[in-house]
Image (tube, grey):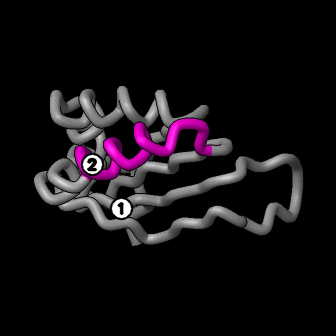
Amino acid sequence: MTNNKDTNGYWIVQGGEIKDQAAFEEYGKLWQPVAKKFGAEMIAHSETADVVEGRGPQRIVVIKFPSFKHATEAYHSPEYSKAAHFGRLAGERSVTVLPGIPL
């Protein structure tokens, strides 16, 4: 069993077309302080991912955190709650929080 506190944490954000650009921009503004507070780093982003099997989302973002705990706390923080509101207004999306694998 993985000890989640000893691994990086990740968010996998998958979304469709941006339908409200103003809300998307507000999300970006509110996300920046959350990223800084929780040590988040965007490690992959694509508006045009090459889906090679199955049906994939239009947009994918992978965000790395120093720990699974940081990733979980960031998502449930009051600061991110405000940002997430605008993220949902911007367009359809899903967010998965998962632990890394110890190497």
**Residue stretch rendered in magenta on the structure:** 18-31
| Whole-percent x, y for residue 3 in the image | 31, 49
Q: Residue placed at 86% from the left, 64% from the top?
A: 52
Q: Residue placed at 77% from the left, 49% from the top?
A: 56
| Inter-mark Cα distance, 2 to 1 | 14 Å
Q: Secondary structure at mark 2?
A: helix
Q: Which residue is mark 1?
A: 64
Report the side of 19 relative to 3 (left or right).
Answer: right
Going by the numbered disc 2, the residue's amino acid type is Trp
Q: Looking at the picture, does residue 43 appear above or below residue 89?
A: below
* Number of marks: 2
* Magenta segment includes 20: yes
Q: Residue placed at 63% from the left, 54% from the top?
A: 59
Q: Quadrant of residue 24?
A: top left
Q: Nearer the viewer, residue 71 or 5?
A: 71
Q: Earlier in the sequence, mark 2 or mark 1?
A: 2
Q: Which residue is mark 2?
A: 31
**Chief secondary structure of the magenta portion:** helix
Going by the numbered disc 1, the residue's amino acid type is Lys
Pointer 2 local density, CA inside 10 Å: few below 14, some 14–19, many at least 20: some
